[in-house]
Structure formats: structure tokens, C-alpha cells
Image (tube, grey):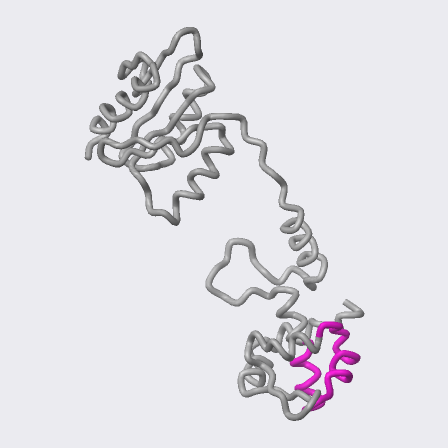
Amino acid sequence: MAEADLYPPVKRFLEAQGYGVKGEVRACDVVAVRGDEPPVIVELKTGFSLQLLLQGVDRQAMSDAVYLAFRAPKRRQLNDILKLCKRLGLGVLIVTGDFVEALADPVPYQPRKDKRRTSLLLKEFAHRVGDTETGGTTRRPRMTAYRQDALRLVGVLTTRGACAVKVLRQESGVERAATLLQNDVYGWFQRESRGVYALSPKGVAAATTFAEALCQLRPAAAA
């Protein structure tokens, strides 16, 4: 499908709503006019791209009613594309053969703040000790506050051997010690008896892998 192949279905879609439609007007792929309303401008591309996005933003200098029309992307990408276009006040038309579907209209975008996500962000920032991560790195274990708490327990168990949860909580300063031990997200702990835990083979290996981090971690209460 060529870019020009998108024009006929988009033209028919707009004409069905009472617009007069013309192509390639002053560098705009599609311009639609209905009565005294502001013109609708549509930019066409076979797929969503940065170039299409920049064209749409440029056309907003001529009209608030700007749409981007393109073939349907993979479903996992579509939500992110819609979120971006809505934030920029751009409409979205998906073209599938002769069928056109409007998934977003060009209206001013007022994002709702997610207080829960903000709270979790600030909580993680406050509880993480030091700046352990280099921004932009991927494919390596994140040194989160949760992992740091688990490592505090590893540190105590490495020094003392099997311990009761109460002792681990006191010496590590990790109030949620029981939860970390029971959930055992990383597979570092093993239950020796009721309320008593020791390091698993993975936990012993973690003590070596994260030896540098263990040296830097103080008990949570003192961190």
C-alpha cells in the first residue's frame, strides 16, 4: 500500500460527514471544510513515524483539527501511539483497506495525575540507599529498595547463620522481614523450622554477587 492509497478511503470517510475534501492543499495531504467550521487537516502515512508526528504538529499552526491517518500498527504499540497523540492534541485515523476508524479526536489533553504511582515513586526514592543505578541501563538486576532490604537479611544470615525472624528483623532493621522471607522473590531464603530461616544456595551466591552492595548497606533503621 502506498501513501496515496490512503487518500480515497479517508476522503470518503470525511465526505460522509458532510465535508468538502481536497488533496494536497498548501503541503497538507488532505483538507476538509464544512460550512464555517475550522478546516480539518489530515496527514497520511503508511505507518506511524516521527516524521508523521512532526508534520501533524506543524499543521496545528493552521488548524486545531489535525488528524494523523495511517495503517493499523501492532496492537501493543497502538495504546502508546494514542497516548502520545492525545497528549499533543492530534487526532488519529486508522485505515484498514477501505475502512477508516477514528480512534482519537484532536481535543486539548488534560492528563490525570495518578497519585498512587506518584506515591510509589517517591516511596521508592526515599527508601533506596544511595544512587545505585545508572539511568538508561537495561538487562541487569535493579538495585531497588526491596532488593536492598532482602540483601540486608542476606547480610545477617551470612554472619549469623540460621536465625529467627525476630532476630533478623532486629539486626537488619527491616520491618517487613517476615514478608520478604515468606515471599522469597529471589529464591535466597529457605525455611529451616517454624519462624527460622537460613540462606538457600542462591542466597549464598547472592552474598558473593552483591558483596559490594552488602558492604555499603547499613541496617534499614539507620539508613
Looking at the image, the residue that sits furthest to the bottom is 193
Which residue is drawn at the image coordinates 22% and 34% (left, top)? 97
Which residue does the image show at 58% across and 81% down from the upper left?
A: 188
- Which residue appears at 38% of the width and 35% of the height? 50
| Extent of the magenta region | 152-176
Judge left or right: residue 28 versus residue 146: left
Q: Is residue 13 left or right of residue 154?
A: left
- Residue 22 horizontal/vertical position (percent): 28, 14
Horizontally, residue 65 falls left or right of residue 26, namely right
In which quadrant of the rendered image does the C terminus lie?
Answer: bottom right
Which residue shows up at 64% across the image and 92% down it? 192
Residue nearest the viewer, comparing 139 with 1: 1
- 85 or 139: nearer the eye? 85
Q: Is residue 220 above or below residue 24?
A: below
Q: Position of residue 157 (x, y in %)?
A: 68, 86
Q: Is residue 86 above or below residue 66?
A: below
Confirm whether the magenta stretch covers residue 30. Answer: no
| Residue 10 picture location, percent across and down | 28, 25
Position of 169 relative to 6 (above/below): below
133 vs 161: above or below: above
